[in-house]
Image (cartoon, rainbow, N blue to C red):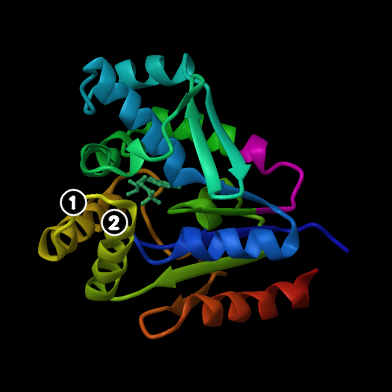
């Protein structure tokens, strides 16, 4: 059976990572959360007091930074230069700065090269904002997941509570809308649906519904 590439894009908190992880598990594929890579760099920049608007400083930092995504029983673990940052990169500080870091063309160029290297052999489910358009433009399956802002905020709120993070629904809604706006309006590789992607509105679907809808498409192409 052919080991294909599956690209999953969409706005913040649309369920991409949950769905991508389940697909990867079903297919025994590698799951690559590209948002975690931008978050990891943002975490390190904040730690080191590097301005998130300073492209050159961020690029220099990234070139010295080893980001590892390791599958584990609890999902994917994220390490930056050997430090486990899996939980801290989901916190408010990183979330509120990551879209500024991800705007810089030189940062994206380096990240995209790393992501393409990770996906070079196929057998991957990769999620992000520009996977179908830039990272894996030849992916056999491209999915664009969307959902209303209210529903996405509700899901993220529930997720935060489960993780023990402080969480306020209205603040989350604003944060998600702000991040979508920056991600959609940036000059380089903005959040957009690839022409050949299948769009799925997950607002009133369960995770399992979305996974089986995507599996139908996958089964036609492997
Ligand atoms: O997917 P997640 O919400 O963790 O992504 C965090 C941020 O990283 C996004 O809001 C976006 O600014 C950036 N990102 C990106 N391109 C990707 C993945 C994430 O610009 N492929």
**Horizontal side, residue 157 vs residue 145: left or right:** left
Q: Which mark is residue 160?
A: 2
**Horizontal side, residue 189 vs residue 27: left or right:** left
Distance, label 2 to label 1, CA atoms, is 7 Å
Whether 104 is drawn above or below 141: the answer is: above
Residue at image location 68% in from the left, 80% down from the top: 216
Residue at image location 27% in from the left, 59% down from the top: 161
Q: Which residue is mark 1?
A: 166
Q: Return the residue nearer the eye: 23 or 122.
A: 23
Crowding at label 1, few (<14), some or many (≥20) Cα neighbours within 10 Å? few
Crowding at label 2, few (<14), some or many (≥20) Cα neighbours within 10 Å? some
What x and y, as percent, mark residue 167?
Answer: 18, 56
Report the residue that reaches farthest toward the left. 170
| Quadrant of the rendering where the C terminus is positioned | bottom right
Query: Is disc 2 in contact with disc 1, using a CB cutoff of under 8 Å?
Result: yes
Region of the chain picked out in magenta, as a range: 116-124
What x and y, as percent, mark residue 39?
Answer: 37, 37
Q: Return the residue nearer the eye: 137 or 53.
A: 53
């Amino acid at each position: 059976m052919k080991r294909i590439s599956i690209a999953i894009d969409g706005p913040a908190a649309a369920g991409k990572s949950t769905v991508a992880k389940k697909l990867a598990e079903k297919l025994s594929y590698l799951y690559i959360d590209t948002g975690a890579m931008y978050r990891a760099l943002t975490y390190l920049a904040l730690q080191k007091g590097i301005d998130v608007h300073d492209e050159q400083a961020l690029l220099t930092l990234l070139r010295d930074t080893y980001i590892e995504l390791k599958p584990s029983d609890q999902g994917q673990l994220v390490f930056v230069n050997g430090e486990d940052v899996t939980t801290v990169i989901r916190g408010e500080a990183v979330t509120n700065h990551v879209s500024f870091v991800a705007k810089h063309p030189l940062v994206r160029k380096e990240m995209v090269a790393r992501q393409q290297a990770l996906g070079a052999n196929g057998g991957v489910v990769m999620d992000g904002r520009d996977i179908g358009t830039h990272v894996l433009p030849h992916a056999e399956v491209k999915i664009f997941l969307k959902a209303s802002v209210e529903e996405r905020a509700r899901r993220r709120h529930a997720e935060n509570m489960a993780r023990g993070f402080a969480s306020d629904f209205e603040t989350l809604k604003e944060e998600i809308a702000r991040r979508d706006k920056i991600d959609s309006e940036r000059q380089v590789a903005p959040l957009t649906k690839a022409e050949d992607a299948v769009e799925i509105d997950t607002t009133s679907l369960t995770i399992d519904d979305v996974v089986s809808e995507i599996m139908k498409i996958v089964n036609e192409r492997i």
